[in-house]
Image (tube, helix red, strand yellow):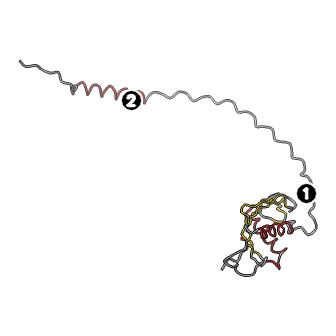
């Protein structure tokens, strides 16, 4: 006895009909008109202009002989701050390349206010030699007032101090390097 099995695959004719129906549905979906664009709300009137600013308070007079920095960033102020320290300590600046071994290397950060005064001082990396640390702090304080950061208002001045056992130093910003 022969048993005829039903074919599990659809007939080619019915597959073509199904494809035609899907294509028609897809095309119909593409041709559906878009919904109307939302109606824009009437624009609000522009906000009223602010009243003219009151005249800026008079600038605080600078002390006679005060230096002024035109730096526009803390990085640019480093040059002005380092030159100022060098000018205040001409006899203590190490001439030429520093020796390979230094008594102290420290990274100091000073907050300078709008009048060139030190507001705060801190070490990002203090020199391990206590005598060098104390002398750098004394030298930095004695150099105040620093150039007034006119465009910045106030600035955080950061520099690396390279300290020789002779008591002379260089700042990384203006260093001549090491041997």
Q: Is residue 34 left or right of residue 174?
A: left
Q: Which residue lies furthest to the bottom in this view?
A: 96
Q: Nearer the viewer, residue 60 or 17?
A: 60
User: Which residue is at 73% across, 33% downward?
Assistant: 44
Above or below, 95 relative to 1: below
Q: Residue 132 carries which label?
A: none
- Where residue 37 sits, quadrant-wise, is top right
Q: In this view, does 109 lie to the left or right of 1?
A: right
Q: What element carries label 1?
A: loop
Question: How many residues crowd around disc 2 within 10 Å: few (fewer than 14), some, or many (20 or more)?
Answer: few
Dot 1 crowding, Cα within 10 Å, few <14, some 14–19, many 20+: few
Q: Circles 1 and 2: CB distance less than 8 Å?
A: no
**Against 14, is 151 above or below?**
below
Give the total number of marks visible in the rendering. 2
Residue drawn 75% across the image and 81% down it: 95
Q: Position of residue 76 (x, y in %)?
A: 74, 65
- Among the two numbered marks 1 and 2 on one chain, the one whose residue lies closer to the N terminus: 2
Name which quarter of the figure residue 88 lies in. Answer: bottom right
Q: In the image, is residue 23 above or below residue 58? A: above
| Image quadrant containing the N terminus | top left
Residue toward you, 31 or 147:
147
To which residue does mark 2 refer?
Answer: 27
**Quarter of the image with the C terminus in it:** bottom right
- Which corner quadrant of the image does residue 30 belong to? top left
Picture coordinates of residue 162 (x, y %)?
73, 72
Q: Which of 116 and 4 is in front in this view?
A: 116
Left or right of 117? Residue 165 is left
Residue 19 image position (x, y, % from top left)? 30, 28
Q: Where is residue 120 in the image (x, y as percent from the top left)?
A: 82, 58
Report whether 61 appears left or right of 14. Answer: right
Q: Mark 1 points at which residue?
A: 59
| Residue at figure coordinates x 72%, y 81% from the top left | 96
């Amino acid at each position: 006895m022969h048993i005829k099995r039903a074919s599990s695959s659809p007939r080619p004719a019915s597959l073509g009909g199904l494809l035609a129906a899907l294509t028609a549905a897809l095309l119909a979906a593409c041709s559906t008109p878009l919904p109307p664009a939302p109606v824009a709300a009437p624009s609000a009137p522009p906000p009223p202009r602010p009243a003219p600013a009151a005249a800026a308070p008079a600038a605080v007079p600078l002390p006679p002989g005060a230096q002024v920095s035109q730096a526009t960033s803390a990085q640019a102020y480093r040059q002005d701050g380092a030159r100022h320290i060098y000018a205040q300590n001409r006899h203590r600046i190490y001439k030429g390349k520093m020796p390979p071994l230094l008594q102290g290397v420290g990274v100091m950060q000073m907050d300078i206010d709008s009048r060139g005064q030190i507001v705060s001082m801190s070490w990002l990396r203090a020199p391990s030699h206590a005598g060098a640390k104390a002398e750098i702090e004394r030298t930095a304080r004695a150099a105040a007032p620093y150039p007034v950061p006119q465009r910045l208002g106030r600035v955080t001045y950061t520099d690396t101090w390279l300290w020789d056992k002779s008591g002379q130093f260089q700042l990384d910003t203006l260093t001549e390097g090491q041997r």
